[in-house]
Image: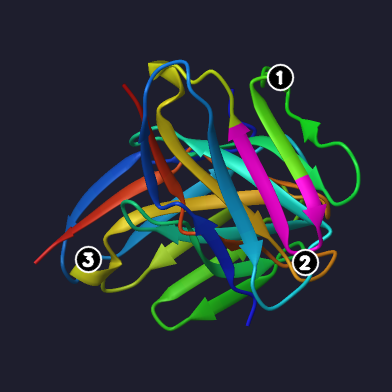
Amino acid sequence: GAVVSQHPSWVICKSGTSVKIECRSLDFQATTMFWYRQFPKQSLMLMATSNEGSKATYEQGVEKDKFLINHASLTLSTLTVTSAHPEDSSFYICSASPRRSNYGYTFGSGTRLTVV
Amino acid sequence: TQLLEQSPQFLSIQEGENLTVYCNSSSVFSSLQWYRQEPGEGPVLLVTVVTGGEVKKLKRLTFQFGDARKDSSLHITAAQPGDTGLYLCAGGNFNKFYFGSGTKLNVKP
């Protein structure tokens, strides 16, 4: 149980276009999901907390107008990278937990974004 | 700046050797997790520790949570090539978790 699916696995887009990444909890409901960003050979940096039915909470330094997060249902959160630039190229990963958890989260398989 | 600092950042050892990875913070966490990540994939949870001083064993892996709940360690006995990967600690307080700087482990046959 507790499976998180992320789509697409990889995407290449042109500079200036927008890209949407989906994160789904397949067998549980998640009122909260998290979005992380990971550069090569580095750790995961928390970008924002996605809250079902309300606005996302962004970490300091993350542009909320550039990284739009929508958590429209208890099983789906989306991250849209708007007007993407090459420096936005990264590995984006979402996570969720089936309960208000102190016991770790399940991660999606990640999305490799390359902006050319 | 990382909320949690891991050491060492890189570790290359021979199969059969023992190793310890450390995770330190100035913050107190209600729980701390250890994850292992393969290239191109999301992290996979290894263990969660919640009680100060707690020790958990998972086969050849031993995890310890500091008494003050600010630090943790991961000890691997008789490392195998299959243990190769990026090891990440993550500290949290119910709502969100922050990841450590990561330790890249390479176990050579």
Provide the secondary structure element on which disc 2 rests: loop
What is the chief secondary structure element of the magenta stretch? Answer: strand
Could you tell me which secondary element the residue under label 1 belongs to? loop
Residue placed at 79% from the left, 70% from the top? A29
Subunit bearing disc 1:
A
Residue A3 location, quadrant: bottom right
Q: Are marks 2 and 1 on the same chain?
A: no
Q: Which residue is mark 3?
A: B17
Badge 2 vs badge 1, beta-carbon distance below 8 Å:
no
Amino acid type of the residue tagged 2 in the rendering: Thr
Q: Earlier in the sequence, mark 3 or mark 2?
A: 3
Inspect the image, locate mark 1, and give the three-letter code of the amino acid beneath it: Asp
Q: For residue B25, which quarter of the picture?
A: top right
Task: Say which of A72 and A102 sits in front.
Answer: A72
Q: Is residue A78 above or below residue A2?
A: above
Say yes or no: labels 3 and 2 on the same chain: yes
Residue B43 vertical position relative to residue A45 in the rendered view, above or below: below
Q: Which residues are magenta?
A: A71-80
Q: Is residue A79 magenta?
A: yes
> Around disc 1, counting alpha carbons within 10 Å, would you say few (fewer than 14), some (14 to 19), or many (20 or more)?
few
Residue identifier under label 1: A65
B46 is higher (above) or lower (below) than A44? below
The chain letter under disc 2 is: B
Q: Calculate the distance from the C-alpha at mark 3 to the C-alpha at mark 2.
A: 29 Å
Reading the image, the residue beneath label 2 is B51
Query: Residue A103: percent from the left, percent from the top?
Result: 72, 67
Residue A89 pos. (x, y %)? 40, 27
Give how far across and how far down residue B26 sits, in percent.
Answer: 71, 34
At which x and y percent is residue B32?
67, 57
Q: Which mark is residue A115?
A: none
**Quick one: quadrant of the N terminus of chain B?**
top right
In this view, B5 is above or below B67: above
